[in-house]
Amino acid sequence: MRKLSLPADSKMLTSSFTYGVATASFQIEGGIDSRLPCIWDTFCATPNKIVDNSNGAIACDHFNLWEDDINLIESLGVDAYRLSISWPRVMHKNGELNKEGVQFYLNILERLEQKNIKAFVTLYHWDLPQHIEDNGGWLNRETAFLFAEYADKISKAIGHKVHSFATLNEPFCSAYLGYEIGIHAPGKVGKEFGKKAAHHLLLGHGLALQMLNKNCPDALNGIVLNFTPCYSASEKEEDIEATKFADDYFNQWYAKPIFDGAYPDIINQLPEENRPEIFPGDMEIISQPNDFFGINFYTRAIYKADKEEHFVQLDPPAPRTDIGWEIYPQALNQLLTSLHEIYELPPIYITENGAAMNDQLEDGEVHDIDRVNYYQQHLSVVDNAIKSGIKIDGYFAWSLMDNFEWAEGYLKRFGIVHVDYETQKRTIKASGLAYKNLISNR
């Protein structure tokens, strides 16, 4: 069986480097009757939004099986577990904490602590309470302040058990996929919405970070952004310029405010109605120092110039994962190098990296060698980046287990653990065993 390996001199093989696995609340928990409705419940109930017409009502039933799942995490030998808190599970409509929901997470955190597994907690992984969306959601500036209140209260309740807090996971996905092109919840469509939602998300990050730093000064407090490096389809000047515009629109739009306190210059090229309303002091709030910077990486994108739009994305070339994303580990190297050159960064954690593959459970085993190869290629890139002087303190495999993959429903499997959704049986795949072997050989 293919194993994961790193050079003997790799700093990723030291005890100070953190290896983890990651999940998200809506994707695994279920337990829908024990929380308020969220925007993904509504989105799933809307016809033709989820490919297989599924929902998150049960998912991986982690709400009931969390003890078994933590034992599973422990069996992999990881140092850390990245999970997200369901805002609608821990808060009532009146803004007070839901004690039962808080206790659910406290039980998990206490068990992780007993097993010496660090808890990396994300406060928002896309499951906005529906009643807040009904009042405008992330298009309403007030939502940023509601998020800060939630961050204040939940961090006071659980912060003593948390090693690291991330305010947001992938605000690009929330803003662009959810409020601009509408393929994610809440399904809004309009260029006039995307950057407005993005600004309120980033403002919410800054306000929440203030609360985390006040309540949990000993925790690592930061944010998680996803990046899809942009490559030009040719050496033509117009294609290179179009690609630069795409990078600013999709990637730097979220990084530059955090590290430089400003949006990319392309803000001046956007129609007035598509620009966010920025209040005095907003950028200072957004650009507070972070203790760490989480980077999620999966693939790259190729662009060329377009007569009607600033850019157009080309279809990804092979090889591709089962979700259709090109496997191009060189882009992770380019990403890490460029971010290191452009910004003054805090320590980096690769908070998500992984691949959807067409897994087959045969005789109780999943021989996902294609996923093992994907991890090998990307871990090698991270190792080389560290050797080049980039400070990367940890790596999290996405995902711990197969789960609800948003608009794809249950059709795409990212897990290093296979889930039979009928029986909820978990089976560690070859990739999970290889990951365990790598960690155990430090």
Image (tube, helix red, strand yellow):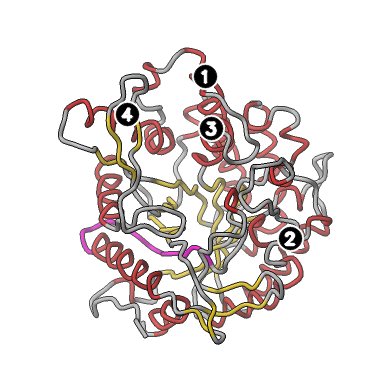
Alpha-carbon distance for marks 4 and 2?
A: 40 Å
Mark 3 and mark 4 lie on one chain; the one further toward the N terminus is 3
| Label 3 SS | loop
Alpha-carbon distance for marks 3 and 1?
A: 29 Å
Q: Which residue is mark 4?
A: 245
- Whether the magenta-drawn stretch holds residue 374 is answered as no
Q: Which residue is mark 2?
A: 30
Point 71% across, 63% down: residue: 105
Magenta residues, as a range? 387-399
The x, y position of residue 111, in whole percent, is 67, 75
Q: Which residue is mark 3?
A: 181
Q: Quadrant of the N terminus?
A: bottom left
Alpha-carbon distance for marks 3 and 2?
A: 27 Å
Q: Which residue is mark 1?
A: 280
Nearest to viewer (mark 3 / mark 2): 3
| Label 4 SS | helix
The x, y position of residue 89, in whole percent, is 76, 52
Nearest to viewer (mark 1 / mark 2): 2
